[in-house]
Amino acid sequence: MSSELATVSADVEAFLKAECPSNWRVANVETLGSKTSGVVLSYEQMDVSAKTDDQELPEGWVWVAFMLILSTPETDAVKGLRHATEELSTLLLILDASPDLKWGPDATRLRFEAGESGYSIPIAFLATNTPPTPEPDPEPDAPEEE
């Protein structure tokens, strides 16, 4: 699933909602709110780059970086870690199956202020950045008279 740069954030959300388990809540971190329950996968758009692994991408292509935050509701550290790791396994299989994204280099374990467990996972989606097509001139200019 490659995407246009202008719509990549919405495309990432649509991809995650379509591929992730239906009992997960997928939301942009900016619209998530503070009250959540269950498994939550939030995302935030970050940087745009014309390079990957120090190699230039072909003209018109960019990587768009996102940070995914996967969280589970348990506040017990042992249960929370186990549940978060189980859900992370599911998420990594989804990410690995998509040829138009890469994740990593690491999934970092998190412990939230209220005690919930989770992981942060950097990903990058491949997107096109094509110039807009100019609008056709509705009527060609008439030749100027002298």
Image: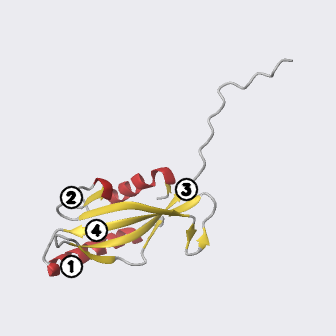
* N-term mark: 1 or 2: 2
Residue 120 percent across, percent down from the top left: 33, 72
Q: Residue type at mark 2?
A: Ser
Given this view, does label 4 or label 2 mark the residue nearer the observer?
2
Q: Which residue is mark 3?
A: 128
- Marks 1 and 2 in Cβ contact (< 8 Å): no
Tell me the SS state at disc 3.
strand
Q: Residues within 10 Å of mark 2 (few under 14, many from 20)?
A: few
Where does the image place residue 32, in percent across and percent down from the top left?
26, 56
Q: Which residue is mark 1?
A: 81
- Dot 4 corresponds to which residue? 70
141 left or right, relative to 101: right
In the image as oriented, which residue stretches furthest toward the left?
76
Q: Earlier in the sequence, mark 4 or mark 3?
A: 4
The residue carrying pointer 3 sits among few (fewer than 14), some (14 to 19) or many (20 or more) residues within 10 Å by Cα, namely: some
User: Rounded to the nearest whole Å, what is the CA distance between mark 4 and mark 3?
Assistant: 27 Å
